[in-house]
Amino acid sequence: MAAAKRIGEPVLEVRDITLSFGGVRALLDVSLEIRAREILAIIGPNGAGKTSMLNVINGFYHPQEGTIAYKGRVRQRMRPHEAAEQGIARTFQNVALFRGMTTLDNIMTGRLLKMRRNFLWQTIHWGPALAEELEHRVFAERIIDFLEIESIRRTPVGQLPYGLQKRVELGRALAMEPELLLLDEPMAGMNVEEKEDMSRFILDVNDEFGTTIALIEHDMGVVMDISDRVVVLDYGRKIADGSPDQVRRDTAVIDAYLGVAHEA
């Protein structure tokens, strides 16, 4: 897959990032890049700093040291809503949906940053505001068709099984039309069939929309199947960065997952 793709220059560059909470260092002198149109997997044992890295990228955490450059510009203490406005969307380990709202309405919330009419127009719900909402609803319906969830479009998400809730959360992120999509354990808690479906959708998003994707995933079979490149963290440090085959054979990676010293 990777050989046939036209992976571009770095969209986001993280340089020498250190993030601490009190006396605990979550990340230590980490540098990595995410290249246009690639699928980058960030892996590592529990507590390695993977989610902390995504939180740094989307502005939820602000590192004490290091720089982040997005689309060639060094970023200064960006907040999550500013990251979203600039084309960075995010999903979470634990599903973060409005459980009482329908699938369609949850996905529509991903269009809020795209709406230009002010609050008064939205309250009146007439004229230009209504036309704008209908336009965004058409886009949301396209996302629903793409993710093959037409049958649950009017179902409150709190009534859906976990795997479908994760798919709806992906749909909400896609509704933002992101250039960079951050997925935090998109297949956690899924069975084999659900993982196969989610893997297919991630590949399709990358292929059909050209979306750059960085994901955290513990299923190494999934990582090796869908990733163009893999970054490995361990105790907050980067210990490997390369193709899936390179990382699979890396002794430092093997040691980190087995928890034993490598012997020649």
Image (spheres, helix red, strand yellow):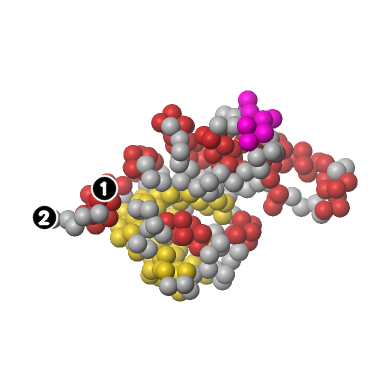
The answer for how far apart the CA atoms under marks 2 and 1 are is 17 Å
Looking at the picture, which amino acid does disc 1 mark?
Answer: Arg
Looking at the picture, which amino acid does disc 2 mark?
Answer: Ala
Closer to us: mark 2 or mark 1? Answer: 2
State the residue at coordinates (30%, 58%): 240
Q: SS at mark 1?
A: helix
- Quarter in which the C terminus is drawn: bottom left
Numbered label attached to residue 264: 2
User: Magenta stretch: dominant SS?
Assistant: helix
Q: Residue furthest left?
A: 264
Q: Earlier in the sequence, mark 2 or mark 1?
A: 1
Q: Residue furthest top?
A: 151
Q: Position of residue 40 (x, y in %)?
A: 41, 50
Q: Quadrant of residue 235?
A: bottom left
State the residue at coordinates (47%, 69%): 21
**Between residues 226 and 45, which one lies in front from this camera angle?**
45
Q: SS at mark 2?
A: loop
State the residue at coordinates (57%, 51%): 89
Q: Is residue 105 above or below residue 89?
A: above
Q: Does 183 sit left or right of 119 as displayed?
A: left
Q: Does 264 sit left or right of 212 as displayed?
A: left
Numbered label attached to residue 248: 1
